[in-house]
Amino acid sequence: MALTSEVKRSLVEYLDSQRPLIGEQAVSAIRSSNEISSSERLTDQQLIDHFPKLFADLIEYLLTNGDSGTRRRTIEGALRHGMTRWQQGYALVEVIREVGIVQRSILDEGIERFFEENSQWSESVHDVRRNLGGFFEDSVAGSVQQYVENFTEQLRNANAKLLIANENLSRLDESRLRLIRTVSHELANVLNALTLTVTLITTGKDETVRSEMLEICQRNVREMSELLNDLKDYSILIAGAAPLQIEEINVRIFADELRSSFHALTRDAGVRLELLIDPDLDVIRSDRKKVRQIITNLIANAVNYCRKPDSRVVLAFRSLSQDFCQIAVEDTGIGIPSEHLDSIFDEFKRISPSEDIKGSGLGLAITKRLVEELKGSIEVFSKVAHGSRFMVTIPKTQ
């Protein structure tokens, strides 16, 4: 038979009075269950935080016999509860089991006892049970819907990350393949030259020629050694096997050390090295070794391309903002044609028109990767016959 207003009113009042007892019984049953292990991380209060809202929705459900508006609000409440349990680490099956325990607690401690104490309305118990079952079906549906939406979002994010990873892997594979081909070519050239030189040394009888051939042989060996060392450094960077070693760096002391270490290089090349330090830039926290390697590569590159007797290289440290600083290396060398600026950091990129400018072609590629490891950026500006300026921007604190 249909529930009368009197039955509904009395039942609602009874359920409200029994709410603390039902909550205690539900918590005890959840705690004793061996199938809801995630509940062990929650306090008793966290387990019943949703009870006031759940009871309010259940009462409305009983009063309206679960009309469409009430069912919609019930599902909306279950969606929010499902999100809460998701954030608390529950598996979907645990949420469903917990909802079942709460339903059983309300049935045993609330509805069954109500009709035991009010036997005159016992014929209405079936309608109440049906409404209770419908309410919890909608509650489970809402929780499942929330989990499905969360799983879908996770899958979408995972697919996006996988797509990016595959694209990066594809680019990395292409880069490594190009690297292998270029290295093979470079080593083959050196080995061929070395083989020819050794042959001339062993077969020639002119001591002057032999001496020249020996010098060429030694130069070839040095170039091969430099190439292999650069390849070793580059392979470590590609593999990400060199973690950052962060320390405090006094910029002025660090710059003076760099100037001293470059003295022989710049003197032999006839290049004047100038040092500029922003008075507002005192200390940074970064990887000293990586910063030093970046600057060394840029200065060596600058000196290599300075061909005039009065050439100069400027190393400048500037404070850009509260969070970032800039390290710039500027030279008065031969410059870089504009069409090469976009590819200047590619592996084995050489733009020199002169054969006497040597190098592995990996220096700037290594430099760019080092800058990226320091969460920075590098830019280059250049004009043919007027020189180049490389600007590295890195955080003051890593």
Image (cartoon, rainbow, N blue to C red):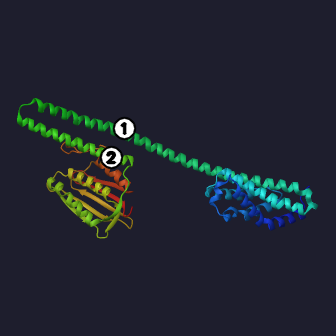
Q: Residue furthest top?
A: 203
Q: Secondary structure at mark 1?
A: helix
What amino acid is at disc 2?
Tyr
Residue 371 place in picture, x, y as percent: 35, 54
In this image, 132 relative to 285: left or right?
right
- Classify 351 as above or below 398: above
Q: Nearer the viewer, residue 55 or 44?
A: 44
Q: Nearer the viewer, residue 355 or 87?
A: 87
* Mark positioned earlier in the residue sequence (1 or 2): 1
Residue 163 place in picture, x, y as percent: 50, 44
Residue 174 place in picture, x, y as percent: 39, 39
Residue at 67% across, 59% down: 80
Residue at 28% across, 48% down: 363
| Residue 85 visible to the viewer | no
Residue 42 place in picture, x, y as percent: 64, 61
Determine which residue is flagged by label 1: 177
Determine which residue is flagged by label 2: 234
Question: Which quadrant is home to the N terminus?
Answer: bottom right
- Classify 87 as above or below 10: above
Label 1 crowding class (10 Å Cα cut-off): few <14, some 14-19, many 20+?
few
Q: Mark 1–mark 2 contact, CB under 8 Å?
A: no
Label 2 crowding class (10 Å Cα cut-off): few <14, some 14-19, many 20+?
many
| Residue 21 visible to the viewer | yes
In this image, 70 relative to 160: left or right?
right
